[in-house]
Image (tube, rainbow, N blue to C red):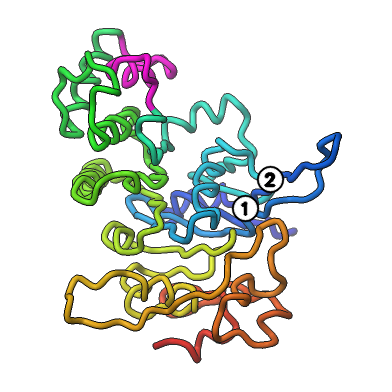
Amino acid sequence: MKATMQTPADEALATDSPLLEVRNLRKYFPVRGGVFLRTVGQVHAVEDVSFHLNAGETLGLVGESGCGKSTVGKTLLRLLEPTAGEAWFEGRDIAKMNRAELRRLRRDIQIVFQDPFESLNARHTVGKILEEPFVIHRLCSPSERRERVAELLTKVGLDPNAAQRFPHEFSGGQRQRIGIARAIALQPKLIVCDEAVSALDVSIQSQIINLLLDLQREMRLALIFIAHDLAVVKHVSDRIAVMYLGEIVETASARAIHETPRHPYTQALISAIPVPDPTASRDAIVLEGDVPSPVHPPSGCRFHTRCRYARDDCQMSKPELSAAGDGAVACHHWRTLVR
């Protein structure tokens, strides 16, 4: 008899299978030029990104601005169409879903955007904004929708009477609470937080983070927390994936990333975190040079142009993510760099 290959759909039947499994995800954007705006190149925004996420778990996705972390989140939701790769959610490949299937998927995967003012319709009241998910998916009667809206506002720490007001009447933190209320309206299993606290004051950031953690425990939500602040990501994440120039260069538990960073880029990010003790000293690792162009990424290891440990083989061959402790790292010489 012929052996049959097990697909992720078959694997999803197992109780310990991940909620989300991303395999070799790529996203390129065309670069157009000339009189006829022909495609003259490609922006390699996301290159062979792979990771998994379990139910109720938080994965932090961190890196410098422009590294591709937000593009990963939007591509997973098909707000951007992937160039290649797979993203399996509960045994279903998101990349191959048709329009009807994607519509059903929206109930299970939601997103909270960075700018709460831009993501809310300024012409609609908060009540109408929060009723919209129920209208689109044809759930509940009008009276039931109003009750659900009141419940959602209470759950995110706002007065139910806020349903009669418009987004411009709220502060930034309150608008983000409205965005979170909209995201949890259909009781999803996964929420992508795309720089959800980056535009807020530090004191408000902590309130929104605590709200997300409370909702996660209550609803057993899985979170992909996208940010550039490693200190914030450490507080909310179970595991962290570090991105550089479209690629994941290291993954590990949040504790391991902070205590024993293995990739030179991760070490530089950790060294830049401010220490709350004014008497304590830390040797900051200053990365020299600019981030290379994603249109023409460097050969071999993409980080070798800024890495103080780079050798000839770093320029010649591309390191693959290989097992390291409780995670993985893409560096030829990481064993000699662990502090």
Q: Tell me the kind of residue under disc 1.
A: Ala
Which residue is identified by label 2? 29
Residue 18 appears at what percent x and percent y? Answer: 45, 54
Badge 1 or badge 2: first in the primary sequence: 2
| Residue 160 left/right relative to 285 | left
- Taking 175 as reference, is 241 above or below it? below
Identify the image quadrant of the C terminus. bottom left
Q: Along the line of sight, which residue is nearer the eye, 247 or 186?
A: 247
Looking at the rendering, in which quadrant would you find the N terminus? bottom right
* Dots 1, 2 in contact, CB < 8 A: yes
Q: Residue at x 24, y 13 (%)?
A: 146
Provide the secondary structure element on which disc 2 rests. strand
Percent coordinates x, y for residue 83 in the rendering: 69, 46
Q: Which residues are magenta?
A: 120-141
Residue at 29%, 8% in the rendered image: 142
Residue 290 vs residue 168: left or right?
right
Q: What residue sits 59% from the left and 43% below the top? A: 93
Residue topped by disc 1? 45
Please, is residue 81 above or below residue 252 in the view? above
Could you give the CA–CA distance between mark 1 and mark 2, rounded to whole angstroms?
7 Å
Element on which disc 1 rests: strand
Residue 209 lies, in percent from the top left, at: 25, 49
